[in-house]
Amino acid sequence: MNRHKSDTLYQLDAVMLSNQINGAAPASAAVLPDALSRQVYCILGIPIDAVEMPAVLSRIEAAAARSLPYSISTPNLNFLVSSQSDPDFRETLLLSDLCPADGMPILWIARLIGVPIKRRIAGSDIFDALKQRRRPAHPLKVFLFGGADGAAATAARALNGGASGLSCVGSLNPGFGSVEDMSRRDIIDHVNASGADFLVAALGARKGQLWLHRNSHRFAIPIRAHLGASVNFQAGTVRRAPRLVREAGLEWLWRIKEEPYLWRRYWNDGRVFLRMLFARVLPLAVLSGWSRLTRRRRIHQLAITQEHGDGSITVKLSGPATAPFVRQMIPAFRAAIATRKQVIVDLSATRAIDARFLGLLLMLRKSLRAEGRFLTVAGFSPRMERIFHLNGADYLLRDCSAWTRSSPSG
């Protein structure tokens, strides 16, 4: 491959960059950040946003006000387990616009590997918070899709029976058909005709995520999310665990009490979780602890250079690709996206990466996919490959050809 080397070294002013990301952008941009501005961490291969409930609500309200497509996923342990063996399901998370952690095991993993995700934000919590908004100028119009037989209609009556931050403008129980069955034109037209702001699906995790993802270009409703048992909770057909039980991380036990058929799913997910804990999470915890210790003893810097080829641009990182340098990497990745070329990230001079950098890499991939382009990770050493594997992100390396294992310029 022929390249024209520019050897452009990014020397970025920290104050200007902070203003760009956090303060100087218009208010709407701050509420609805682009993918690279999201504070995303890679937790065993899936993106998790470090975000609080007020920010979640603000982003939902902004997307509704501007009619901007905005997809929300709320990963829990079942999402995490399913994503390990189901690339299509994992892709629905990777292409989502927001992924707050819905599941205590994800928080436990985050704490073990030093990721600053403070609390669980369940899909049902988001639904309740939207409902409990006090005297909103414009209640969000919601469409309920799925749930147990009759639950959506019952939940709709409950929502519209009193003052609330949500008003239900339609509901539909599609039955137990396939994703293809539920993607018929008459069904999509019926959903769109409601004029809703927020489409809430409750079909089971895999089916709901795939249905929303495959039909994303067909929906006129801006905000879309699969919120699990929220419809059943609102209808009263299933009681949600008391707050103390949820905060103790024992909601799964309550769910089994309320819905005994769930025990098999929790049993299978629990076994996979224990395997991941010993095979990946604990080694990552040791590695991240050692990295934090050595980081205090050494002064590190990150240099970023670009090499322009005929149809690609290579962004080479020299130094640690870790959380303290993410703000330095964001403008370089934005500039690479703006070239409209294929993007290669060269790690041949990188010896340290962490969950925050991998989260940024997932967002770079998402941004490129939105334009029909692909991300290539180049120059990774066997050690880097091992770290990608422990983080569940080795799928980012699988499409790389043999030459990417060495520096592109070597």
Image: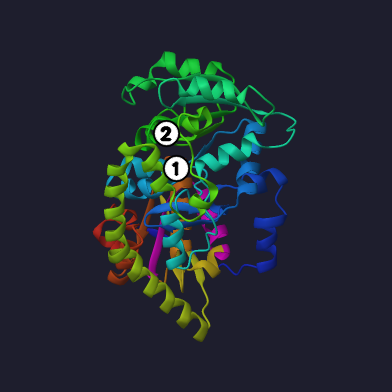
The residue drawn where x is 35% and y is 32% is 207
Query: Can I make out residue 373 in this image?
Result: no
Q: Mark 1 points at which residue?
A: 95
Residue bearing mark 2: 213
- Residue 329's x, y, as percent? 53, 62
Residue 398 image-quadrant placement = bottom left
Above or below, 331 relative to 299: above
Q: Quadrant of the C terminus?
A: bottom left
Residue at disc 1, secondary structure: loop
Could you tell me residue 197's position as x and y percent? Answer: 60, 27
Report if residue 340 lies within the magenta region. yes
Residue 291 belongs to magenta span: no
Q: Which residue is drawn at 32% across and 23% down?
A: 176
Q: Residues within 10 Å of mark 1 (few under 14, many from 20)?
A: many
Q: Nearer the viewer, residue 38 or 202?
A: 202
Q: In the displayed structure, does residue 281 sit left or right of residue 202?
A: left
- In which quadrant of the rendered image does the N terminus lie? bottom left
Q: Point out residue 324 in the picture as x, y percentages from the top left corner.
A: 55, 70
Magenta-highlighted residues: 327-348
Q: Quadrant of residue 134?
A: top right
- Colour approach in the figure: rainbow
Residue type beneath disc 1:
Leu
The residue closer to the viewer here, 230 or 335, is 230
Name the outermost residue toward the left.
402
